[in-house]
Amino acid sequence: MASLATEFVGIRSPNPFWLASAPPTDKQYNVVRAFKAGWGGVVWKTLGEDGPPVVNVNGPRYGAVWGADRRLLGLNNIELITDRPLEVNLREIKQVKRDWPDRAVVVSLMVPCEEESWKAILKRVEETECDGVELNFGCPHGMSERGMGSAVGQVPEYIEMVTRWCKQHSRMPVLVKLTPNITDIRYPARAALRGGADAVSLINTVSSITSVNLDTFSPEPSIDGKGSHGGYCGPAVKPIALNMVAEIARDAETRGLPISGIGGITTWRDAAEFIALGAGTVQVCTAAMTYGFRIVQEMISGLAQYLDSKGMTLGDLRGRAVPNVTDWQYLNLEYVTKARINQDLCIKCGRCYAACEDTSHQAIAMKPGRVFEVIDAECVACNLCVNVCPVENCITMERLPPGATDPRTGRIVGDYANWTTHPNNPMARAAE
Amino acid sequence: MTNSPLTPGIVSGRLPAAALAANFADVEPPLDRHEAMVAADRCYFCHDAPCITACPTAIDIPLFIRQIATGTPEAAATTIWTQNILGGMCARVCPTETLCEEACVREAAEGKPVEIGRLQRYATDIAMAKGLHPFTRAASTGRRVAVVGAGPAGLACAHRLAMHGHDVTIYDARDKPGGLNEYGIAAYKTTGGFAQAEVAWLLSIGGIVIETGKALGRDFTLDDLRARFDAVFLGLGLQGVNALRVPGEALARDAVDFIAGLRQAGDWADVPVGRDVVVIGGGMTAVDAAVQSKLLGAETVTIVYRRGPEKLSASVYEQEHAKTAGVRILTNAAPVAVHGDGAAAEVEFAYTEEGPDGLRQLPERFRLKADQVFKAIGQTLAGVPEGLALTGGKIAVTGPGRTSIPGVWAGGDCAAGGEDLTVTAVAEGRDAAEDIHAALAAGRGRG
């Protein structure tokens, strides 16, 4: 079996599956259970300044979005950073790291934007002999109202400044956790890099209201009839996270900056996708909160089997998809495909027809006996029929070979051409 | 209790009261909310859905399932009732496995259709429990329509006519309205007095009067009705029963009587049944009689059908239900005599074979022990008023139930065309009502 042993900014773990800073990593009891289940590492739930403990709401902390059969697709929370005394957390972290030396223990931190505050806590955290720190610049709720969390993460200059303090006042690796609640993830990532960050981890949760109660007219989760935006996570945010990871992985300035990928990772497959887009480790929360810690066993066996089947090492997989992430303008406009419906697999539901006829290009004919066929002269290859078809692989996209004539445009298909040289592009460069 | 399944003869109380109550409980319990959500979620919301085409009343099934899935079963019930005012009963008794659920694309995809019938029951049960009746009567037209037969066809016709503002009088020969819904369906398919509750709910639209105990040909004639009403709808059902035409026939009982008696019984323990029961026939009536005989505590119950298994008109689902209940099904055996001295003791059968000239009996014979014998070999139209053209033994109709006599429409089992199903009767009654309404509006009607 392929080895999943991971070294990430000098931090070793037996596999790349870490638990993200969140309720599952709030105390020794949970973390020990996680390590017993097989997790490679944890990012301990965010510690704050010494002093009176953080106060949480006493009503519901989570809201949810469900899919079919109440499958949890998205979770939102308004929980704050740890509400346990700093001293207790530090003592437990030290104990856990001592008991589990082969596992990664990274500590998440969030203190006010003052150098002394960071200096003070870094010193105490370093004494636990943990493997590194993660700067929580991501939480969008509660703490951000006090100038911390995403309030820092949304200002690249603050990220750079705090990261620099942390590197100055600590020997530990520093991971900077980024908020997705910005317009362009590259700016905070570049700021972290300039500040000396060893890695970035992303994404933190997305600002969200999961639902509105139509009887009480309160947002959910509802606290005495009122709600506050929370942080959204779970499978629903994975596409957002993948894009942000890819943007950093392929940006000229941040390329090569280690990434710990976070966002809706539920199975080994999700994890492999993040790794292929450049993540060195992945962090999981919602899946564990939904199913418990044992899911890591599926992640470990699944990733190892996949690597074996591909004859790849974990290192081979890392970043493998990054070169294939490009700008729209470079996409091959000579890649002409047509939808093909496999009549043997078709169950005749007609969803492809409804989707194409009502909302797309009228490129599917409904023939007697509920036979659905693609009209090549109309099909723009949008893929919507593939996406709405309930039967996997029933509808596929088939490429027209170069030299063939596209019945829709009457053009002969070429090998490669993109927008940069297209005659309709006023900015087109002359062909060389 | 002194009797048991082994007690000879036709006796009651073969099983303890608790066993009888359990046996005659809802054969398919209603879905709870969670189950309904899971079931509804499986619907693909097909384009021009095959299930709608397969439904004789053309209920917009994907729409009502989506309405259930989004937490509005009341709206779902309205969608159902708009097409099928007896949607509650049809949800219970429709052979969905040969109609909507057979057509469901999930059946093609994975051999497991969306549970359309049970979802329909979920929606209609909720809406009825809330007393919702989402239809109102139009301003009275002053037109009067007679409906003969308070079965599914007649009730559906009457409700639609009442909606259009016509005054309807329904005549029915029996003591209670409902027709086969009240008298002709296995008790475990429609428990808790549902048939009468549904009729009461249907009548709540107003403008409909039911006169029970009034039979066509006995208490009034078709000419009387044509003279007194602007239009007449005949939903007579099939009152005759086919005969075996074998020696000893008098020792056999009509299965429909047995089924009707069961439905009207106050206490299952009072219903007598044989120790060894033989049911002759191969349709739903045979299954209903056989299964209920078994549920009452008969020791052995055998359905015997003269043709091959592929010709059984009871659906595969019904056949499986019977077998699970412990009923044996024999095919290719035709009765030649019922033996017994004053009461049935045995039925003698000849093996049969399909040949080029049709079914023929083989010389080999066998006998089945039987202290009770039921005939379930089909019902026939009886007591048809003179002057009505017939075809294939049923009232000939054109278009939406127009008979050969102007101003007289017919639908349901008594009319030619369509399967003899509750849902088909509802569709025919409804469509005839629309045609009657159009005719009355156009000044036609009474010929």
Image (spheres, rainbow, N blue to C red):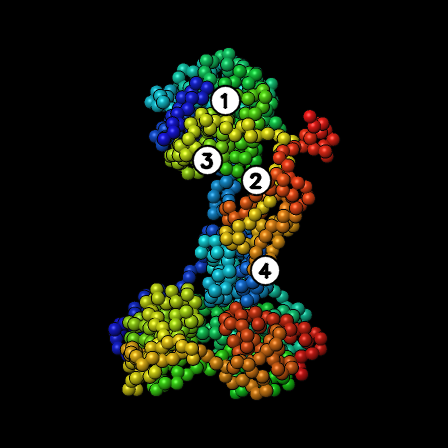
Labels 3 and 1: the sequence-earlier one: 1
Question: Residue flagged by tag 4: what amino acid is it?
Answer: Pro
Q: Which mark is residue A269?
A: 3
Q: Is residue A173 left or right of residue B134?
A: left
| Residue B379 in the image, given as x and y percentages of width and height | 46, 79
Same chain shared by disc 3 and disc 4 = yes
Q: Find numbered disc 1 in the image and state the secondary structure of the residue it sits on.
A: loop
Labels 2 and 1: the sequence-earlier one: 2
Q: Whole-Å distance between the Cαs marked 3 and 4?
A: 41 Å
Q: Residue at x 55, y 30 (%)?
A: A324
Q: Residues within 10 Å of mark 2 (few under 14, many from 20)?
A: some
In this rendering, does residue B196 appear at all?
A: no
Pointer 2 indicates a residue of which chain? Answer: A
Pointer 1 indicates a residue of which chain? Answer: A
Labels 2 and 4: the sequence-earlier one: 2
| Residue A234 in the image, given as x and y percentages of width and height | 50, 36
